[in-house]
Image: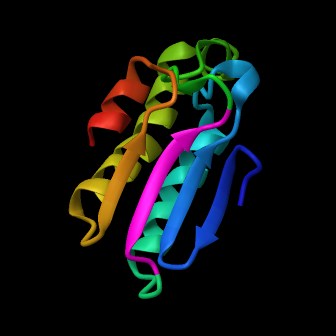
Amino acid sequence: MTESIRIEKDGEVTRLILNRPAHYNAFDFDMIDGLACALVELAVDKSVRAIIITGEGKAFCAGGDLKWVSGFAGGPAAGFHRLAASYHLAVMEIRRMNKQVIAAINGIAAGGGFSLALA
């Protein structure tokens, strides 16, 4: 699991913590892919009944990391396309999961971060 997603289990509740506070938890590929993978694993984990998604520091999630996207080898459009695939997987896992998923908004929730909170 990537360091940009921290997982804390407490009994039947698991906290997924977006862990890029210096970037207001804006997601780069490692973060959003890590979030999607964690959600896939937790969806089938019978010991987990609820998931809380929150951000480290003073932001929930500022959306896509524009600096990461602009530096993507194939250009910004390709960078957004790369992020979108994993982002959509994460949102779909939240929407179809047969468990409670709570967004604990601790600050800024902008762009894709706002959509993640609404999911």
Does 53 lie within the magenta span? yes
Residue nearest the observer in this picture, 64 or 20: 20
Quadrant in which the C terminus appears: top left
Main SS, magenta region, reads: strand
In the displayed structure, would residue 95 be above or below residue 28? below
Relative horizontal placement of residue 28, taking residue 1 as reference (left or right) = left
* Residue 84 at x, y percent in the picture: 41, 35
Residue 91: percent from the left, percent from the top?
Answer: 33, 47
In the image, residue 119 lies in the stretch drawn in magenta: no
User: With respect to residue 17, does 45 lie above or below?
Assistant: below
* Lateral position of residue 45 relative to residue 118, left or right: right
If the image is split into quadrants, where does the N terminus sit? bottom right
Q: Residue at x 59, y 20 (%)?
A: 65
Judged from this view, the residue extending furthest toward the bottom is 46
Q: Which residues are magenta?
A: 48-56
Q: Using the rendered view, name the quadrant where residue 10 is placed.
A: bottom right
Vertical side of 67 occupied by 51: above or below: below
Q: Tally the marks.
A: 0
Residue 12 in percent (x, y) is at 47, 78
